[in-house]
Amino acid sequence: MQNIQDIILGVAVLVYLWYVFIIIYHLIRFGIGVYPKVVVLAFFLISVFLLMLSLWAWSRVNWDQLFDLIKKFLSVTKTG
């Protein structure tokens, strides 16, 4: 089960980093003047902070308990 979680996390991080790269690239490449570069710097710093926060939150989740709750919920909704 841990391998699947690691793969999901890895794919999510890669998609997120690609998204951030595309935004930063286009803001720097097509921005005129200094203001777009300042916006890119702020966006990049906030993106790094949010990535670290989400990785920390991902590591704190008790996956077995979460899956048990989902199974209970599905069994209750199926029967009633």
Image (cartoon, rainbow, N blue to C red):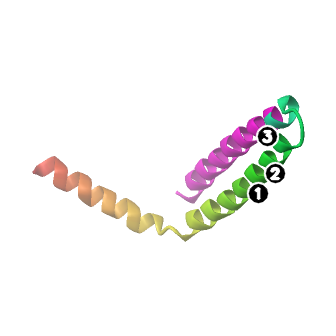
The image quarter in which residue 35 lies: top right
The image quarter in which residue 15 lies: top right
Q: Secondary structure at mark 3?
A: helix
The image quarter in which residue 48 lies: bottom right
Q: Secondary structure at mark 2?
A: helix
* 30 left or right, relative to 58: right
Which residue appears at 52% of the width and 57% of the height?
1
Q: For mark 2, what is the residue?
A: 41
- Binning the other alpha carbons within 10 Å of mark 1 as few (below 14), some (14 to 19) or many (20 upward) gives few
Residue 26's disc is none
Query: Can you give x and y, in whole percent of width and height, for residue 55 in the image?
Result: 64, 62
Q: CA distance from mark 3 to mark 2?
A: 9 Å
Query: Can you give x and y, in whole percent of width and height, for residue 27 in the image?
Result: 80, 36
Task: Please state the extent of the stretch shown in magenta in the rendering.
Answer: 1-26
Give the residue at the far top of this rendering: 30
The answer to whether mark 1 and mark 2 are in CB contact below 8 A is yes
The tag earlier along the polypeptide, 3 or 1, is 3
Which residue appears at 56% of the width and 54% of the height?
5
Q: Amino acid at mark 1?
A: Leu
**How many marks on residues?**
3
Q: Amino acid at mark 2?
A: Leu
* 56 left or right, relative to 30: left
Q: For mark 3, what is the residue?
A: 24
The answer to if 5 sits in the magenta stretch is yes
Q: For mark 1, what is the residue?
A: 45
Q: CA distance from mark 1 to mark 2?
A: 6 Å
* 15 left or right, relative to 68: right
